[in-house]
Amino acid sequence: MSYRYGEYRDGPDPLAPPYDVRSALDRMGDAILSGSNPAHALRDLLKEGLPGAQNRRGLDDLLREVRRRRRELRERGRLDGTLERARALLDKAIGQERAELFPDPSDEARLREAELAALPDDTASAIRELGDYRWRSAAARQTFEELRDLLRGEVLDSQFRGMRQALANPDPAAMERVREMMSDLNDMLDRDARGEHTQADFDNFMSKYGDMFPESPRNLEELVDTLARRAAATQRLLASLTPAQREELGRLIEQTLAQAGLDEQMRRLGESLYARRPDLAWNTPERLSGDEPMGMSDAVSALDELADLTQLEAALRQDYPGARMDDIDEAAIRRALGRAAVDDLRALRQVERELEQQGYLLRRRGKLELTPKAVRRLGETALRRVFASLESGRRGDHDQVDAGSAGELTGSSRPWRFGDEQPIDVVRTVINGVRRGGSTGAVTLSVDDFEVAETERRTAAAVCLLVDLSYSMALRGTWAAAKQTAMALQALVASKFPQDSVQIIGFSNYARVLQPDELAGLEWDMVQGTNLHHALLIAGRHLDRHPDFEPVVLVVTDGEPTAHLRRNGSAAFEWPPTQETLELTLAEVDKMTRRRATLNVFMLADDERLKDFVNEVGRRNGGRVFSPGADRLGEYVVSDFLRARRTR
């Protein structure tokens, strides 16, 4: 036996490494950290595709291909080609007959000429009246039979793709076989409607008539789908013609079916197909702008494909509520764009499924959410972004290395300095003496040889980050920065300061505690009001629950307080802010001062009212006021937090 090896061509490489969903999550994270929500981020990822090793086209690329194909179909030709060709063949037959009659001086020839001259202008009526005409010209008789064959083939092929090949043999037995197939098909549909159909019935039907169905359907459902789509396309063809053309072609179809003995069977089939697939666009007109006339069968095929592409375009846009990749018909993709597009679609579907199966995404009540596992990864990404923007000299450290004997050993040592209370590192001290004095003789120690063990004091902090969620944050383009900052601070505390207790509070007309796993999907509130009073109340309760922790309070806002909490729990909003709102908010600031909590405020707007308010907060509390740009908010907040922890 001989073997030949080559490139695998039947679809994607089965030995290729699986797609790394972590990179997909990171790409989603870029959008989420820029202010998007998980559903929109996933949609954008699937639209853009999977570059790199996978090199898979996205939904936008497939959508462009579908639209290009639609334009090609619309510019292919005209829908009245069958009528035009039928008229041409009829005129040719009549001309050939007149040429045969002209040399004959008999009265019979003149009567025949008069009969031909009196034919109706309508093609269908003229063909019907010529049905019993005894042609004198053999060429005219052959042309008229060609016209009949054309109509019979076009009409049947418009309903059953490939029927023209089945009727290529002029033997009457071929037409009789078509009639038997139609009868058996209608009987099978009737049995199915009564619940009596079996797969064996369908298999027997296909064994007898499978050559008439080039689509090779596997069951009755697939056969019905194929026939219903072509029947609907035929109705759209008629609806797309002018009223005169529609009437003329309709009569030609009826006449052709009646002559073939198929009118009753076709009526039964049409009723069954419509009852099973009323969702198809049966009478929606289409406009084709090409110049080349198309036969009825080709026109129906074009309209059938156009309907496919229209539905495919809607599914690929994914812009309707609850849209999912599973909504995209893989068979329609294969018919329209080929096997390569199917592979791209499967790769995109795999990413969506893997993100859920590997525990990064969760669908809850129809809403897409990030799991805590994904939120932790995005928080780390946000933190890396913040630290990447920090200058190395400004990063600082949260450890205090001169904590004395009460601190915890870090495992490192340093030279002794006057006043140090850390324990002497005996081993390092002796080694220094040996190195200085050599390896022989007694070891003598000098002051420079002494090293102390480093210790650090890790104090616990109660951290409160108050983030403005009001709609103005989105209008000013600062919401994405605030969201990224919250995630970065949450990740920093969780990874570097696990002993700390952090609480992130969002506030608009009301304030609420934000859980870590909801930060990624968090969006601004479409309401009016900046209720800093309520946010400070919640932050105060958090600090009171941790009386032994060092208090750290950070406020991110773009506007002065315009709302406060009434005694009955409702929110009072007023613009410009009332004196009561300002007094209640500043009263909570004073309470923070008595708790020894310093409020540092990060202003995201250059507003005089806001400046006056935060300056008053700074005067009362002693905290600092920052005015960073949105692109440096995370850097400012994290730096200030680290400075506060180091100072503490």
Image (cartoon, rainbow, N blue to C red):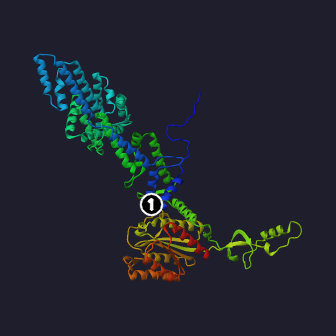
Locate residue 465, reporting x and y percent. Answer: 50, 72
Q: Is residue 49 left or right of residue 148?
A: right
Q: Is residue 8 visible?
A: yes
Locate residue 507, reporting x and y percent. Answer: 44, 72
Depicted 297 relative to depicted 614: above or below: above
In which quadrant of the rendered view does residue 66 lie?
A: top left
The residue identified by callout 1 is 37
Query: Residue lying furthest front in this view?
Result: 103
Q: Give amino acid for label 1.
A: Asn
Q: Nearer the viewer, residue 58 or 10?
A: 58
Locate residue 330, reporting x and y percent. Answer: 41, 43
Q: Residues within 10 Å of mark 1 (few under 14, many from 20)?
A: many
Locate residue 437, reporting x and y percent. Answer: 85, 69
Q: Is residue 195 visible?
A: no
Secondary-structure class at tag 1: loop
Depicted 74 relative to depicted 171: above or below: below
Q: Is residue 253 left or right of residue 356?
A: left
Q: Nearer the viewer, residue 34 or 264?
A: 34
